[in-house]
Amino acid sequence: MTSTYDVLLGRLRHAFDAIHVGADPALRASDRSDYQANGVMALAKSEGVNPREMAQKVLSHLDIGDVAEVEVAGPGFLNLTLTPSFLNSQLRSLLSDERLGAATVGGRTAVIDYSAPNVAKEMHVGHLRSTVIGDALARMYRFRGYHVIARNHVGDWGTPFGMLIEHLIDVGEDEAIASLSIGDLDSFYRDARAKFDSDDVFKERSRERVVALQGGDAETRRLWRILVDESVAYFAEVYAALDVTLTPADVVGESYYNDMLSDVVRDLDAAGLLVESGRALCVFPEGFTNRDGEPLPLIVQKRDEGFGYSATDLAAVRDRVGNLHADEILYVVGAPQSQHFEMVFAVARAAGWLPDTVRCEHVAFGNVLGPDRKMLKTRSGDTVKLIALLDEARSRASSALDVRTPQMDSHQRHTLATQIARAAIKYADLSTDRQRDYVFDLDRMITFEGDTGPYLQYAHARLRSIFRRLNEPWDSAEVTFELNDNAERHLALGLLHFPEALDGALATLQPHRLSGYLFDLAQRFTTFYEACPVLSAAEPTRSERLALCELTARTLSLGLSLLGIEAPDQM
């Protein structure tokens, strides 16, 4: 099914081409649900003619009578109002379309790098945005038809693992596994760090252990594997609690690229890009300077011959293009890393590892703030754990359900409270422009009113309740959409915008564009529901309105699922 926008734009392009102006008019939806071509004004200026004259000229070549009624308005606008017959055909197509008009893209691969916690450390609020935004993009890309390869680039390598392995040896494997298996990763890490800072003998042992780890010592690697496996199991529990699609199979940490780093250095040197600076091996990509205007280096190999993040990220780019055959690579990482990724991409392109045909983008995001607009912390000043956030949201959702539906049994309440809690947390993030900071306010996020996840869930549940009250079979096969009421038409136009909302979210990698569309659709439904009786209406109006409700429920359910949010049938 071709989207309404594409149908209109195609007809307008044909009309503009017919008068040899070669323009690509911008199209936008107006508040009156009409369509307006605003390219005429600029064209009239370039041709030196009156804008209304140019509008009439375009109109004379515009074959659009079966799609929209057109009039010249104001100084030269073309106002397009979709015809009832076109709306009817589009809506009837949606009734039999599981994808609700959204197109598919076959044969393309997207690698999406997101979440990236550290081994032996618990997941906290700092991982929230990467995890939630990345998972929403992964869901949207899969729905679009991409082969999505998720990459959870966990921190599982480097100097800290010397002290962690030595601490594991000191406390004993059984006790260490018992501690790590219950998710008490932070305590294990803190104890190891305290010992490292206070005990010179332990510190020396830790340094020797790092050498053994990097050298491939079998026993050291076995102990390191214990730390990694227990941490990955804990991460999986957090993802399951949040309903995030990442699995242990998606974990490809820093260690995976360790054996590729020497090749990165060798090939950069062979390409003439490597420069020794301060005894470190660097690349100076064009266009990057420090505050003094001096060329800024990307350090590939440090003066101690160790490798840092830059080398690992370059190896990851090579692997994702060369071995995974990615057409698109997305890095869902905080905004402070923007320059780092820009430099990595620039070096990878200069080395020939990242062709221009591959879309490679840093999907940057802002911070999660507390009510004081500072980084969200606990009262004691500790970083807030993700599980603690979910537990608190679930508790508040359960309390709200106690008031709203006291008759609900405990199992139903727990299940629904979990769904509401996830929706509250995810939607608050995904309804915000990802590049902005946002305030984490559970009191606002958990409400059933306003621009919140629970509000959208409730709108879906209210729609489904209409069909439960129907108490008889209903078939939309013979429905015709007359749309005689303005509220019906307003809702119908909103339904037709779903493909465009999804396209916009994917083109800009901004999930809030889809979130905003869903909120607008829910508001349109509320206006419709208040103005247009459904079950009490006479036929054929009753069936038409039921069909609009069915399409709205399906659109909300599908749209929410692409954000990683469940749409309960009852609330």
Image (spheres, rainbow, N blue to C red):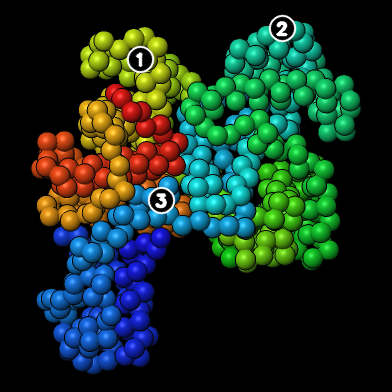
Q: Residue 144 carries which label?
A: none
From the top left corner, tell me how far across and down residue 554 is, in percent. 35, 41
* Contact? badges 2 and 1 (CB < 8 Å): no
Quarter of image, res 368? top left
Query: Distance from label 2 to label 1 (Cα)?
Result: 36 Å
The residue at 83%/52% (across/down) is 263
Q: In this view, does 536 lie above or below 107?
A: above
The residue at 23%/92% (across/down) is 48
Residue carrying label 3 = 97
From the top left corner, tell me how far across and down residue 52 is, in percent. 16, 85
Secondary structure of the residue carrying numbered label 2 = helix
- Circle 1 Cα neighbour tier, 10 Å, few/some/many (<14 / 14–19 / ≥20): many
Q: Earlier along the polypeptide chain: callout 2 or callout 1?
A: 2
Q: Quadrant of the N terminus?
A: bottom left
Q: Which mark is residue 413?
A: 1
Q: In this view, does 391 lie above or below 299?
A: above
Secondary structure of the residue carrying numbered label 3 = loop
Quarter of image, res 194? top right
Q: Residue 175 carries which label?
A: 2
